[in-house]
């Protein structure tokens, strides 16, 4: 009754099923692994000591920024230079701007420093003059996927949509660190900007998208198997009817 499974048509169906099911299981397992990695990163981030309890470390000792060094308290010395506003940034549910000032460090490189946040429309206070030592949470350069980043362009002069060395390379002649710090204690007239969790380390929407994709791949594997059994059963019933001559009678 099941000799039809050896026909060329069914060979094609069987090969497709034999390839599709392992592929779906592989993809579902991979997506589940991505979700579990995010859960582990989230737990590790929760167990990390608060930046305020960690000893401040010279900036260069924490570079490059990774999941271990992101949020660590860094120090750097130098003189403030050019200043930018980073608009459309929320803090405690209010819209405003980050005040980003470039610190020309004693080592010669330039470090973007978020001195604080101010409400929309308020003027930014001038940066302190002379030699300063800043202390703040180390952050990785932002990307187009970072929350609050403005990538549409068209910002007025003196404003910056994304805090990154790439966005500053055409605005300043200096060698800019591929990192930035947000001051632990904001300058007068500003509100301190809390450090953000490292990218891909939290249980955000993307993490639950991975979990959703896991379910979709496993459901698709089950669907392929279900449809194969259904086609086999229908074909077997047709073969059985032909063997009994029922199809000829119906005709």
Image (cartoon, rainbow, N blue to C red):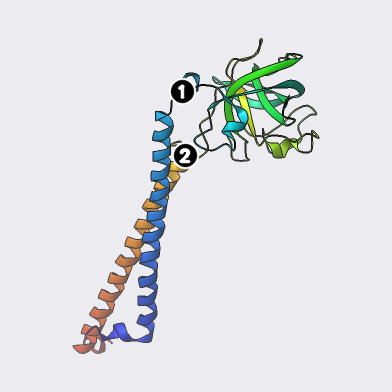
Crowd rating for badge 1 (residues with CA inside 10 Å; few <14, some 14–19, many 20+): few
Q: Are marks 1 and 2 in contact (CB under 8 Å)?
A: no
Indicate the secondary structure of the residue bearing disc 1.
loop
User: Can you give x and y, in whole percent of width and height, for residue 117 in the image?
Assistant: 63, 19
Residue in front for this viewpoint, 248 or 135: 135
Residue depicted at 38% across the width and 44% down the height: 36
Q: Nearer the viewer, mark 1 or mark 2?
A: 1
Q: Is residue 230 above or below residue 202?
A: below
Q: Which residue occupies 70% across, 16% down?
A: 132
Nearer-the-camera pick, 87 or 230: 87
Left or right: residue 110 compared with residue 75: right
Q: Where 126 falls versus 248 (above or below)?
A: above
Residue 248 left/right relative to 41: left
User: Residue shown at 44%/32% (left/top)?
Assistant: 45
Q: Residues within 10 Å of mark 2 (few under 14, many from 20)?
A: few
- Does residue 127 appear in the picture of this structure? no
Estimate the x, y position of residue 169 in percent, counting from the top left.
76, 38
The residue where tag 2 is placed is 205
Question: Residue 50, labelled with which disc?
Answer: 1
């Amino acid at each position: 009754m099941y000799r039809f499974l050896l026909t060329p048509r069914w060979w094609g169906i069987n090969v497709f099923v034999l390839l599709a099911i392992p592929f779906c299981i592989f993809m579902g397992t991979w997506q589940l692994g991505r979700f579990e990695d995010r859960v582990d990163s989230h737990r590790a981030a929760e167990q990390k000591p608060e930046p305020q309890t960690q000893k401040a470390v010279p900036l260069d000792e924490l570079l490059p920024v990774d999941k271990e060094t992101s949020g660590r308290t860094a120090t750097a010395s130098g003189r403030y230079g050019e200043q930018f506003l980073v608009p459309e940034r929320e803090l405690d549910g209010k819209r405003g701007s980050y005040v980003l000032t470039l610190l020309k460090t004693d080592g010669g490189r330039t470090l973007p420093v978020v001195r604080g946040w101010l409400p929309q429309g308020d003027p930014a206070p001038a940066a302190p003059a002379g030699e300063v030592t800043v202390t703040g949470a180390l952050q990785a350069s932002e990307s187009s996927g970072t929350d609050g980043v403005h990538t549409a362009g068209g910002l007025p002069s003196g404003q910056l949509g994304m805090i990154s060395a790439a966005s500053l390379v055409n605005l300043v002649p200096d060698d800019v660190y591929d990192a930035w710090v947000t001051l632990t204690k904001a300058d007068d007239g500003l509100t301190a900007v809390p450090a953000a969790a490292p990218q891909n380390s939290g249980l955000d929407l993307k993490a639950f998208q991975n979990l959703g994709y896991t379910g979709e791949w496993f459901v698709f594997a089950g669907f392929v198997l279900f449809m194969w059994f259904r086609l086999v059963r229908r074909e077997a019933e047709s073969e059985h009817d032909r063997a009994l001559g029922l199809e000829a009678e119906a005709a």
